[in-house]
Image (tube, rainbow, N blue to C red):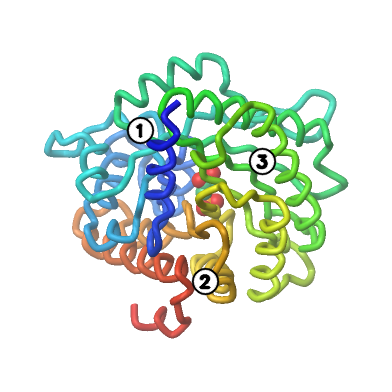
Amino acid sequence: MNLDELNKIAKKMVAPGKGLLAADESTGTIQKRFDKIGVQNTEENRRDYRELMFRAAEGMKHVSGVILFDETIRQKAKDGTPLVKLIEQAGAVPGIKVDKGTKPLATTKDTVTEGLDGLRERLVEYHQLGARFAKWRATYDPTEGRPSYNAINANAHALARYAALCQENGIVPIVEPEVLMDGDNSIETCEAVTEWVLKETFAQLYYANVALEGMVLKPNMVISGMKAEKRAGVEEVAERTVKILKRCVPSAVPGIAFLSGGQSDEEATAHLNAMNAANPNLPWALTFSYGRALQAAPQKAWSGKESNVSAAQAAFAHRAKMNGLASTGQWKKDMEKAA
Ligand code: 13P
């Protein structure tokens, strides 16, 4: 393992003013996004849509890396340039989602993320295709007494085995343990589950000999469930999230890049900004690795029409810029109106 090289990549991924674009929706997930804008889920449409983002120079200024799906890392733009090249030309690092999704965990109501079989060989190929970081996502539903320790332990163990394999192959692992926010749980429950999950994840990373300097953590924020009766405000989300991260994440980790998890675009920006504005001297960089919160606006603006490409690129640039500012605590609500 060349830890210096991994550390350099990890630092680039969380450089101030920039964050990650999660464009790694599987074919099934992008179907859900395209259904909303009335676009057919063909390989060409998926390519055209992603190409428009990677060619959006203004937006990509605020993007340090892009997480891709297996199909996309192999795709070429309309003019034959590999999409990976477009990302590199924009100054960003190409990355790849390598997990194979969640499956029910036997005897529980929880899930476990699969994909370890053949992973070493896949990582070698992805490295050849240009990937310098990878992503593996475990999910936890924090309602009705869930998750079980069995699920937390099984997922943390898989995350650690994945992370060790990545580092062995010159790839920075994004370790993503996600406490979901779709339910009716309180912010207190999210906080307790997030703390437990992170403690177990870092224990397993230690046992698996993962070098913390060569990874990026992608957690949820500590937040109320979407269906909760009373949802906590921006300051409370920021305070509780930073408190739990301080308790659980060693300072050797270069950076933490949050998922958006179903928050509205502006909510995701406001939360990240509040954390950075109130805590200028944290041991790790705090930035974004958003999927929906970066792409909902450009998807709507595009709606599958060639004539809407510039409008979609402008919508993407706006969200990327707002989140870039939030990564250094310099975003202000009234900047949204100017768009
Ligand atoms: P969201 O920001 O839409 O939650 O997606 C980020 C991601 O990559 C989840 O794995």
Q: Is mark 3 within 8 Å of ligand 1?
A: no
Residue 131: mark: 1
Could you say which is closer to the camera, residue 119 or residue 182? Answer: 119
Give the mark toward the camera: 3 or 1: 1
The answer to whether residue 39 is left or right of residue 115 is: left
Residue 273: mark: 2
Asked if 214 appears above or below 282 in the picture, the reply is above
Q: Measuring from the top left, give residue 323's x and y in whole percent.
A: 43, 66
Q: CA distance from mark 1 to mark 2?
A: 29 Å
Q: Residue at x 63, y 53 (%)?
A: 220
The residue type indicated by label 2 comes to Asn
Farthest residue to the left: give it: 79
Q: Residue at x 68, y 54 (%)?
A: 182
Q: Measuring from the top left, give residue 179's x and y in whole percent.
A: 69, 48
Disc 3 designates what residue?
139
The residue type indicated by label 3 comes to Thr
